Image: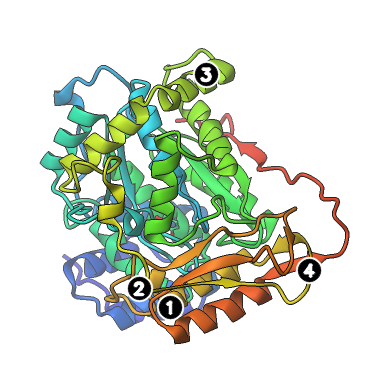
Amino acid sequence: MSASPLPQEILRHKRDGLQLRDGEIHSLVRGITDGSLCDAQIGAFAMAVRLRGMDPSETLTLTLAMRDSGRVIDWRAFDLPGPLLDKHSTGGVGDSVSLLLAPMLAACGAYVPMLSGRGLGHTGGTLDKLEALPGYRSTVDIDELQRVVRDTGLAIVGASSELAPADARLYAVRDVTATVDSIPLITASILSKKLAAGSQALVLDVKTGSGATLTDPDAARELAHTLVAVASKAGLKASAWITAMDQPLTDRVGNALELGAVLDVLAGRAEQPLLLSLSLALGAELMTAGGLASGWSDAVGRLRKALASGAAAERFARMVAALGGPTDVFERRNRHFAPAPMVAAVFAERAGTVTGMDVRRIGMALVSLGAGRSHPDQVVDPRVGFTALARIGCRVDSERPLALVHAADKHSLLQASDALRGAFRIVDETSQRELPLLHERIAPRATEAA
Ligand code: URA
């Protein structure tokens, strides 16, 4: 038996731009999983891949090795009466689609075992939002995950020691080492979790625009093609939509604040038009792929009905209770969310119409408020964020602020207010063209189909 290569030798190969052999990739992923690689080596690996890239075969090998760092869920014994469907996004700000879409799909007859992530770089994380609920357990064993999915139709949890553990560790290091925006690392991170969850069809939401992980439209397209091709080669039916992240999808951002926005939409108390439109589009893609609808308009009709009837809200409440969260999440939500100690309006320096914003900057302002992390063990503050965020096309002046800032203390409030002022593009004219939310659909090429 040949000895495992030394990690520093493998790192040197990638640093120098060489193609890694399968054995080298397996050895690194084993080291990430069993703890024999330290965080510095993981950071060096992530940076070498970020700078040197990986070719398609290395990306596939990394994805499969990360999937196999834990177990792959086998659903056959459950004999579920509906398809196993899943969705994942490459990350955005105010992007709570997973929280809205998963219960809508469950209410339409799908089963959704969704392995999600925490905040990554400037983007928010589904798990951080759910953990704003006291008691919510996002780390569960496979038996519990399967039971919750069987009983409620969905479970939104994280990578764990059993499911894609290599991603849990690599993800935390990438978050704080400026190594998020890498096509092979994003692909392996997302698909290792999705393949481990054992779903039958997946839709990928690949963001483009100022708040996307990859802001360049060509890079977003390449990422979408890579995700769909690697998923297909790994046997998972997948398609992708390239969608706009040129403003947050909700007018409230921050962990508890976004969760509150989703609860309002589920309960029919408020509208978040961008969030709903995108959820319907991605949901229609999945419902059609999973055989739950005859086509796009049938799927959209069913999803809307699931929302309007309260069936989606009921699914969400059951999942939260089953995973240790409150049993009265809709009825007594104010009891569960502590407000931030300080709330203040931030006004633009001049009156005018918002024509654009630097969404990445808004995301980083959220991180500095405490909604995200600057080192892997940091605990996020669920209370902080922005509400009443001005949208593109909105007029701001001395009466209408850019947003309300929710902060833990005065220093972070002032810092976030400054960042926010610098993030908005404001002009005199009032007319505004509609920006498309859905840019392009990416399907597997004939030679790739799963
Ligand atoms: N979501 C993930 O799970 N991983 C990434 O790298 C980006 C988005």
Q: Are marks 1 and 3 in contact (CB under 8 Å)?
A: no
Q: Marks 1/2: CA distance?
A: 6 Å
Q: Amino acid at mark 2?
A: Val
Question: Residue shown at 57%/77% (left/top)?
Answer: 417
Q: Amino acid at mark 4?
A: Ala
Q: Marks 1/4: CA distance?
A: 38 Å
Reply above or below: 355 against 75: below
Question: Quick one: label 1 or label 3, which is nearer the N terminus?
Answer: 1
- Identify the image's colour scheme: rainbow, by chain, secondary structure or one colour: rainbow
Give the image location of residue 112, x and y in percent: 32, 34
Tell me, for residue 278, which label it has, or none.
none
Q: Marks 1/3: CA distance?
A: 43 Å
Give the image location of residue 406, x and y in percent: 45, 69
Reply above or below: 314 against 439: above
What residue sits right under mark 1 in the picture? Answer: 177
What residue sits right under mark 3 in the picture? Answer: 301
Question: Quick one: label 2 or label 3, which is nearer the N terminus?
Answer: 2
Callout 4 secondary element: loop
Decide if residue 178 is in sight here. yes
Q: Quadrant of residue 153?
A: top left
What residue sits right under mark 4 in the picture? Answer: 351
- Dot 1 surroundings within 10 Å: few (below 14), some, or many (20 or more)? some
Q: Are marks 2 and 4 in contact (CB under 8 Å)?
A: no
Q: Are marks 1 and 2 in contact (CB under 8 Å)?
A: yes
